[in-house]
Amino acid sequence: MDALAPLGRLLFSALFIFSGLNHFTQGEAMMGYARGAGLPFPALAIYGSGVVLLVGGVCILLGVFTRIAAAAIAAFLVVAALTMHRFWGLPPDQAAMQMTHFWKNISLAGGALMLVYFGPGPYSVRARSQVRERRAQRLTPTLRPRPQE
């Protein structure tokens, strides 16, 4: 069962890693979409969010700074849902697709918040460093006061 944690991190993080890379390889097209949605400073929004997605995804994958990375991704997802996928007020033919994207982002934010709460689990960089710390503590002699005679 312990293998489910790294598998879950892999499946969850893949979307963010590839999306983050896409923010850099398709930045111009994404900036046009951001401009159309009325975002100020679209270049900063696209490249800044690309960094959050890419770094956050890699951190989640490896299980290092998982809680911080998952919190940043959750925040990004909620902001993106509210700014880029505003389905309310759209014509019905456009609203359905935007509503799907909106709820996808909100659901993924919920998954990210679960990572914030539970952490990376076993088989992560963090878990490995905790094992090393425990070993070092066992090997380090403790100085105990001698009993009084």
Image: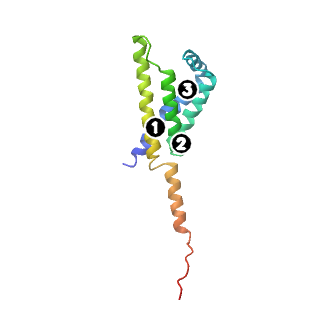
Residues at marks 1 and 3, CA–CA distance in whole angstroms: 20 Å
Where does residue 89 sit, x and y in percent of width and height?
44, 14
Q: Which residue is mark 2?
A: 68
User: Who is closer to the viewer here, 89 or 26?
Assistant: 89
Q: Amino acid at mark 2?
A: Ile
Tags 1 and 2 touching, CB below 8 Å: no
Residue 39, disc: none
SS category of the residue bearing label 3: helix
Q: Which residue is mark 1?
A: 112
Q: Residues within 10 Å of mark 2 (few under 14, many from 20)?
A: some
Where does residue 106 sit, x and y in percent of width and height?
43, 30
Residue 95 vertical position relative to residue 105 in the rendered view, above or below: above
Q: Amino acid at mark 3?
A: Asn
Horizontal relation, residue 105 to residue 142: left or right: left
Q: Which residue is mark 3?
A: 22
Residue 109 vertical position relative to residue 119 in the rendered view, above or below: above
Residue 143, located in which quarter of the rendered image?
Answer: bottom right
Tags 1 and 3 touching, CB below 8 Å: no
Q: Return the disc, 1 or 2, that comes first in the chain's sequence.
A: 2
Which residue occupies 57% across, 17% down?
38
